[in-house]
Image (cartoon, rainbow, N blue to C red):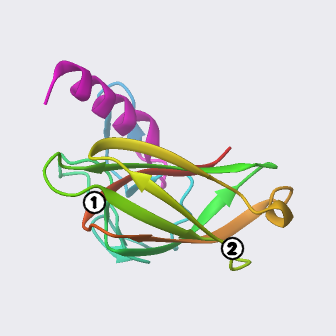
Amino acid sequence: MTRLHRAIAALMLLTACAPHDGRFDPSHFKWTGVGAPRDVVLPLGITPGSSFGGLTTAAPDREAFCCAAGPHVDVPVRKDHAATRLTIGTFLPAEGPPNHFRVTFPDGTVRTADGGRGFSTFSVPVPEALRPRRGTLRIRVDASVAPYTLASIYFE
């Protein structure tokens, strides 16, 4: 892994994967709660390292990127503003085939995108009818290669 890859990894880890229960010590950059991509709405009472919707939350004692994702991830994602794009950040080791993603929105609209090896970010257009909507939208992501790391998923 090059210095650039390490710098990008550190940035993604610090900005994309965040604690959801408020137990965070920014002076040491170590969180002690449940880690998941910032805009994923976690169920109440979830514990570190548990799985839901095809996503495994990060545990504070693991020094790994957040969060392991299976071939099918179906999670609620916070949407606080009108948005035209859904952006997804992933990590997949450099060896092997690239990852192909199928993103399904709550209205049934399907978008496809290719994710590269290593750290990769892609975005897909939000369906016209869902752009002004605020709240929580359930998003399904199907991947051709799994497991992979889901570092971020957010509306912009």
Is 28 placed above or below 51 here?
A: above
Locate residue 103 relative to residue 83 in the image: left or right.
left
Q: Identify which residue is drawn at 79% across, 48% down.
A: 81
Q: Can you say which quadrant of the picture contains the C terminus?
A: top right
- Amino acid carrying label 2: it is Thr
* Residue 123: % across, % down: 57, 48
Is 94 placed above or below 144 here?
A: above
Question: As rendered, which of 87 and 61 lies closer to the eye?
Answer: 87
> Circle 1 sits in a helix, a strand or a loop, which is it?
strand
Callout 2 crowding tier (Cα within 10 Å): few <14, some 14–19, many ≥20 = few
* Residue 14: % across, % down: 38, 34
Q: CA distance from mark 1 to mark 2?
A: 24 Å
Which residue in the protein does label 1 denote? 148
Locate residue 39 relative to residue 147 in the image: left or right.
right
Is 52 placed above or below 137 here?
A: below
Q: Nearer the viewer, mark 1 or mark 2?
A: 2
Question: As rendered, which of 55 and 2 lies closer to the eye?
Answer: 2
Q: Quadrant of residue 138?
A: bottom right
* Residue 57: % across, % down: 34, 63
Mark 1 / mark 2, whichever is N-terminal? 2
- Amino acid carrying label 1: it is Tyr
Q: Can you say which quadrant of the picture contains the N terminus?
A: top left
* Residue 150: % across, % down: 38, 56
Marker disc for residue 91? none
The magenta span reads 1-23
Which residue in the protein does label 2 denote? 109
Contact? badges 1 and 2 (CB < 8 Å): no
Q: Quadrant of residue 101?
A: bottom left
Tell me, yes or no, whether the highlighted magenta stretch contains residue 16: yes
> Circle 2 sits in a helix, a strand or a loop, which is it?
loop
